[in-house]
Amino acid sequence: MIIDEKLLEHVQQQRKPAKKVWLGRHYLYFILDETCNAIKIGVSNNVNQRFKALQGDNPHSLKILRIIEFKGYDWKAAACKSRRLESKTHEKFKDCQIRREWFRYEGKLRNFIEQL
């Protein structure tokens, strides 16, 4: 079941393989706190480093569910793409928002992430 055709299509368009050499890379990530059933939707240029920082500050085990890579001719272009999609995703699922970048991992948000 596709929750939001436009948003899913936008994600898929951003993931198409590059035809040129991209110098910039940035990522949109979905990190799950299974104990609280909460998901963090954020951006980073180094997801592993971000994950370690989040895990170090969190008493519960975290799990990376999805990572979407954005490419650009430079870092700023890639970051702009990832932040744009992050904002759209936050806005689309604001009814699931717990606090800032943390959302309840349920219903339409869960279905959306599983489709990525």
Image (cartoon, grey):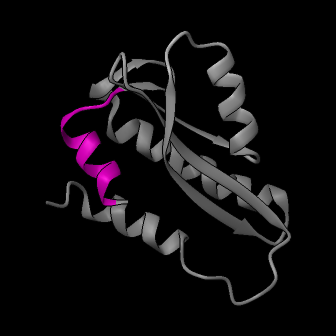
Residue 18 relative to residue 42: left or right: right
Looking at the rendered image, the quarter that the N terminus falls into is bottom left
Q: Whole-percent x and y of residue 84?
A: 57, 50
Instruction: Answer with the quarter of the image where residue 5 lies.
Output: bottom left
Q: Whole-percent x and y of residue 115?
A: 30, 59
Q: Whole-percent x and y of residue 100?
A: 50, 20
Q: Is residue 14 above or below residue 92?
A: below
| Start-end of magenta stretch | 104-115
Q: Residue furthest bottom?
A: 19
Looking at the image, which residue is at 32% across and 23% down? 37
Q: Of helix, strand and loop, which mostly describes the magenta segment?
A: helix
Front residue (pair 30, 85):
30
Q: Residue furthest front?
A: 61
As for residue 108 lying within the magenta part, the answer is: yes
Front residue (pair 19, 76):
19
Looking at the rendered image, the quarter that the C terminus falls into is bottom left
Looking at the image, which residue is at 31% across and 64% down? 6
Q: Whole-percent x and y of residue 107?
A: 18, 37
As for residue 80 lying within the magenta part, the answer is: no
Looking at the image, which residue is at 77% across and 87% down? 20
Residue 39 relative to residue 49: left or right: left
Residue 40 relative to residue 52: left or right: left
Looking at the image, which residue is at 23% across and 32% down? 106
